[in-house]
Amino acid sequence: MTHVLILDTGEPVPYQLNHRPRLSVGLKITATGLVVHAPKRIAQAELERILLKKSAWIQKKLAGLSANPVPAMRWQHGEDLLYLGNSMRLVIERHAQSKAVRHEPGVLQLALPVPQDTKLVARKVVAWYKKQALQDFTRRLQIFASKLGVSFASLALSNASSRWGSCNSRKQIRLNWRLLQAPPHIINYVVCHELAHLKEMNHSAKFWATVASICPDYKIAEKELKSLSASLHRLKA
Ligand SMILES: [Zn+2]
């Protein structure tokens, strides 16, 4: 699950927390950012205290990461994917007839006659993300639209390289399917942002107050989204 560490400088650092049967806390920096392995029973406050002691190391490593572009997807067996803020492993199996895609917690499994067909792998994985995104985003839009007392006309998925969402005067909302990789609270923020535009078609103080009314932590979510942006764009359509 993705958590956020707030450094002494106030800078939010999203990290992936994996509980493992181990006694100490381990840190590593991967293509998608900071990954923490921690014992199952550690309290969150204790864990954050340990992480804060390693702030200097984390900042140095992350600075190095942002200096280097996120490694491109190779669309091979074993590839690390992100789904709702959790890591998900791409498993590709050879199968003569089947081209099924199966999702289990932590695993996206593809059956293909030719597992090395990276173009087909990419197409199938992206199609899976888009299908899930449409369901997931629709549900979130419905929940937050009713909280805000607004109604939207339609949802379409976008493939934009620079925008996460948009909304027009016809109440049509577009959301980038790559957001499905982000933690739920970040998707919620983008959903709330676009829905708030149904009341305020601008970025005035009134608009941000509307966002805050259904998404109080929007400022942190916005910063996190910026810091995750490069890794979310690893998936190309
Ligand atoms: Zn906006």
Image (cartoon, helix red, strand yellow):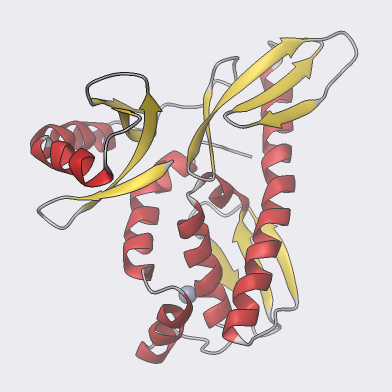
145 lies above or below 166: below
In the picture, the quarter occupied by the N terminus is: top left
Horizontally, residue 214 falls left or right of residue 9, namely right
Does 10 sit above or below residue 23? below
Q: Nearer the viewer, residue 153 or 71?
A: 153
* Quadrant that contains the C terminus: top right
Reply above or below: 201 against 54: below
Whether residue 10 can be seen here? yes
Quarter of image, res 90: top right
Tell me the residue at 52%/58% (across/down).
187
Residue 101 locus on image (x, y percent): 76, 28
- In the picture, residue 10 is in which quadrant? bottom left
How many marks overall? 0
- Residue at 14%, 34% (x, y): give it: 60
Quarter assignment of residue 230: top left
Instruction: Tell which of 143 and 94 is nearer to you.
Output: 143
Front in this rendered view, residue 218 or 74: 218
Q: Residue 70: x and y, percent?
A: 38, 32
Q: Residue furthest front?
A: 41
Who's the residue at 68% across and 81% down the image?
A: 171
Task: Single out the residue that lies furthest toward the right.
Answer: 97
Q: Is residue 4 left or right of residue 110?
A: left
Q: In the figure, is residue 9 to the left or right of 192?
A: left
Residue shown at the point (54%, 82%) measured from the top left: 197
Res 168 seen here: no
